[in-house]
Image (cartoon, grey):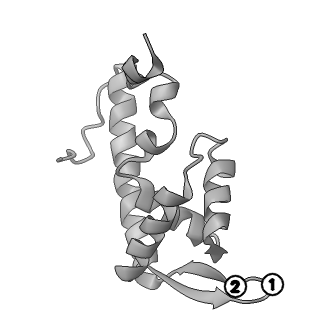
Amino acid sequence: MSDADAEPAAAGTAEGTRGSAAVKGHLDMLLLAILADGARHGYGVIEQLRDRSGAAFDLPEGTVYPALHRLERNGLLSSDWDRSGGRPRRVYRLTPPGQARLREQHAAWTELSSAITTILEGTPWPSTTRAITA
């Protein structure tokens, strides 16, 4: 069987939980979190994603740059051109609406991941928290 005929990695395997597939639906939150620590140029964002995830999220420019542009169009990021150090680079920073969105997404992620962990560990969900709706 050739590589082209091979089945994709099953979810839950090491290969199936890394990279672009693992961040699907969470990329915006991850980008906002990286930029919450301070302004960075696009490649610096990519490096931080890779470094802070232990290389689990080694995403290509073709994934990250369009997301940065979309977040900027939506007012969650702003950018300026930095011409120091030679070639000009666009530097992105979080806006106040971006900070608010990150707080919301972080809270939702914390609740979701807690519920998933509870299911995986077979312990009952605390009755004092509200139900998660899809």
Q: Quadrant of residue 122?
A: top left
In percent of the image, x 57 and y 71: which residue is there? 36
Kind of residue sitting beneath label 2: Pro
Residue 80 x, y percent position in the rendering: 59, 89
Few, some or many residues within 10 Å of mark 2 (<14, 14–19, 20+): few
In percent of the image, x 39 and y 24: which residue is there? 8
Can you say whether 9 is above or below 114 in the image? above
The CA span between labels 2 and 1 is 7 Å
Can you say whether 124 is above or below 99 in the image? above
Few, some or many residues within 10 Å of mark 1 (<14, 14–19, 20+): few
Q: Is residue 45 left or right of residue 124?
A: right
In percent of the image, x 43 and y 79: which residue is there? 72
Q: Name the foreground residue: 81 vs 127.
A: 81
Q: Secondary structure at mark 1?
A: loop
Q: Is residue 54 left or right of residue 28?
A: right
Q: Where is mark 2, residue-wise? A: 88
In percent of the image, x 33 and y 44: which residue is there? 112
Can you say whether 78 is above or below 35 in the image? below
Instruction: Using the image, tell me which numbered label, if any, was put on residue 86.
Output: 1
